[in-house]
Amino acid sequence: VAVDDPENILGYVEGFIRPAGQILHADKMEIFKAALNTARTSGGSFSGGGTFLGPGLLVAYVCLLHGRECGCGKIEFLAIDDAEFQHKRLVRYYRTAGFKEVRYVGEELKDIGDRLVWGGCGTLMTENVDKVLRKWTGVT
């Protein structure tokens, strides 16, 4: 949220903590480019945000810290396969961020359980919360 404009939201993560497993289940992350551009041009103390991982990394790690504080040791999410180009980009982004590919969730009978949990096809990715935090921050 922008300091001078609380309506100007940089981004958000949707998800929940699974009740039976200390797993942070991240469903969606969205960064609003217009808010990022406004922050860059506002003349305030904001600088950067244009790196490869950019503000998505910041939003994701706030989510990871919350999960860690709630006892989660692992994070899982699905790099959704809505379009081939975007799917490859998501997998590459999260692999670079430190996540591992578990398997592809497709349209086969064996994928029904995962499809019910995730709501679509894509690459299931996971990692230990502390390991990812250590990779990108001094937090352990």
Image: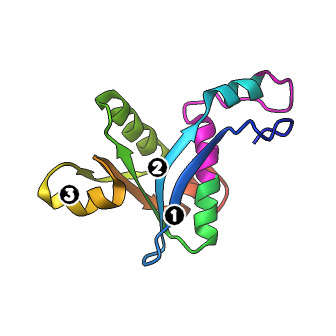
Residue under numbered circle 1: 16
Q: Residue 51: within the magenta? A: yes
Q: Residue at x 61, y 46 (%)?
A: 12
Q: Nearer the viewer, mark 2 or mark 1?
A: 1
Above or below for 87 versus 125? above
Image disc number at residue 111: 3
Badge 2 crowding class, 10 Å Cα cut-off, few under 14, some 14 to 19, many 20 or more, is some
Residue under numbered circle 2: 98
Task: Return the disc, 2 or 1, that comes first in the chain's sequence.
Answer: 1
**Quadrant where the C terminus lies?**
bottom right
Residue 20 lies left or right of residue 129; in this view the side is left
Q: Residue furthest bottom?
A: 20
Q: Residue at x 48, y 74 (%)?
A: 22
In magenta, the rendered stretch is: 41-61
Task: State yes or no: discs 2 and 3 in contact (Cβ < 8 Å).
Answer: no
Q: Residue furthest front?
A: 7
Under circle 1, the secondary element is: strand
Under circle 3, the secondary element is: helix
Closest to the observer, 1 or 79: 1
Q: Residue furthest left?
A: 109
The percent coordinates of residue 39 (x first, y second) are 76, 29
Three-letter amino acid code of the residue under disc 2 = Gly
